[in-house]
């Protein structure tokens, strides 16, 4: 009986330690190039990775991100699709590499990514 009590206690302590000392894995982020051509194919909450590349002059809550791979393109002829993001809190700076969590919503002009959370990973100096 005593060895079952010890075994049960050890099992409970081991499970508690696993739960306590393991953190959830980082959510895998999709790239802008993966979603920009067909945002209607994605539903529900998702996380995107990109570089802040544009800001709307008409709407202070709207900015755009480009794919991280576009940092490698240095010619002026690069086609850098920009994905519009709406975020009502503090916007990232130009060149910030971000992880944006939210969902696509259909709007009169197309699809817009409505962000619930924007996390800055680091800054890339864009434009010199």
Image (cartoon, rainbow, N blue to C red):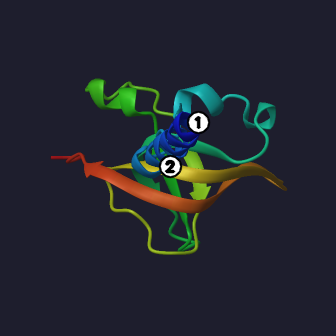
**Residue 97 on image: x %, y %:** 35, 47
Name the mark on residue 4. 1
Image height of 96 relative to 30, above or below: below
Residue drawn at the location 84% of the way across and 56% of the way down: 108
Q: Residue at x 59, y 26 (%)?
A: 34
Q: In the image as oriented, which residue stretches furthest toward the front?
A: 1
Q: Is residue 21 above or below residue 69?
A: below
Say which element carries label 1: helix
Q: Nearer the viewer, residue 29 or 35?
A: 29
Left or right of residue 36: residue 14: left
* Residue at horizontal 40 percent and vertical 47 percent from the top: 21
Q: Is residue 6 left or right of residue 124?
A: right
Tell which of 64 and 121 is nearer to you.
121
| Snapshot quadrant of residue 92 | bottom left
* Frontmost residue, 28 versus 93: 28
Dot 2: few (<14), some (14–19), or many (≥20) neighbours within 10 Å? few
Which is more foreground, mark 1 or mark 2?
1
Alpha carbons under labels 1 and 2: distance apart: 18 Å
Instruction: Pick the quarter of the image with the N terminus.
Output: top right
Residue 67 position within the rendered picture, expressed as x and y whole percent measured from the top left: 45, 34
Q: Residue 72's quadrant in the figure?
A: top left
Residue 89 coordinates in the image, percent (x, y): 51, 75
């Amino acid at each position: 009986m005593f060895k079952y009590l010890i075994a049960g206690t050890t099992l409970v302590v081991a499970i508690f330690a696993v739960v306590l000392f393991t953190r959830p894995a980082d959510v895998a982020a999709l790239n802008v190039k993966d979603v920009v051509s067909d945002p209607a194919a994605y539903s529900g909450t998702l996380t995107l990775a990109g570089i802040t590349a544009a800001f709307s002059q008409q709407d202070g809550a709207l900015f755009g991100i480009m794919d991280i791979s576009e940092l490698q393109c240095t010619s002026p002829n690069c086609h850098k699709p920009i994905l519009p993001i709406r975020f009502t809190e503090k916007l990232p700076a130009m060149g910030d590499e971000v992880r944006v969590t939210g969902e696509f919503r259909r709007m009169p002009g197309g699809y817009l990514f409505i962000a619930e959370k924007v996390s800055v990973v680091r800054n890339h100096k864009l434009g010199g």
